[in-house]
Amino acid sequence: MDTEQSDYTWDKAFFEKRSTLFSNFQMGFIGAALMLMMMDLSKIYLLAPLVVGLILSSWYKHNLDNIKDEMKGCTLTFSPKSILISFPQLETESRITFREIDEVEAHKENFVHIISLYLKQDDKKVQLKGMKDTEQLIQQLKTAIKTVNEQ
């Protein structure tokens, strides 16, 4: 198995960058609305898009904060026949052998990379949200699963 990098962590910089971006959007929408009201241009057709933008940026920031609270400090460590996934915020740790993994799937949801590990038993799914180097992690997982299943 390829052991270039055996530990993967959640992408703290991504979450901080996005959180700051959406906080700035919120302040910008509020500032623009206040500016329009001070200039006596507070018409519904001018303020409505700002309210929609404020609601959408608040909703997205709330979702990011929820994911950050869940995944903060998450690590994934490879060993020769299994992976150890640690969620410090949820105070859980689980070891999953490569034989237990049925499929590895990756997708983006709200601009956050999500890696889903589908397990053979109990039709259970483990989701890793916002991990660093997702492409490399997926490739290493698929290679390890293939190697173990060929033995």
Image (cartoon, grey):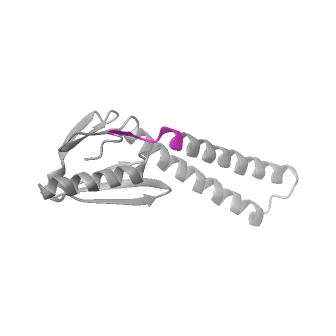
Q: Which residues are magenta?
A: 6-15
In the rendered image, the vertical position of residue 115 relative to residue 66, given as above or below: below
Left or right of 146, for residue 88: right
In the rendered image, the vertical position of residue 53 relative to residue 10, given as above or below: below
Which of the 4 quarters of the picture holds residue 115? bottom left
Asked if residue 10 is among those painted magenta in the image, a careful observer would answer yes
Find residue 124 and report its horizontal and vertical position in percent.
20, 55
Residue 100 visible? The answer is no
Total numbered badges shown on the rendered structure: 0
Q: Residue at x 14, y 58 (%)?
A: 150
Task: Looking at this view, name the residue that lies furthest to the right.
Answer: 39
Q: Nearer the viewer, residue 34 or 129?
A: 129
Q: Residue at x 70, y 62 (%)?
A: 48
Find residue 102 and report its horizontal and vertical position in percent.
19, 59
Find residue 37 and report its horizontal and vertical position in percent.
82, 52
Which of the 4 quarters of the picture holds residue 74? top left
Q: Nearer the viewer, residue 113 or 144?
A: 144
Asked if residue 99 is among those painted magenta in the image, a careful observer would answer no
Left or right of 126, for residue 8: right
Q: Residue at x 43, y 45 (%)?
A: 132
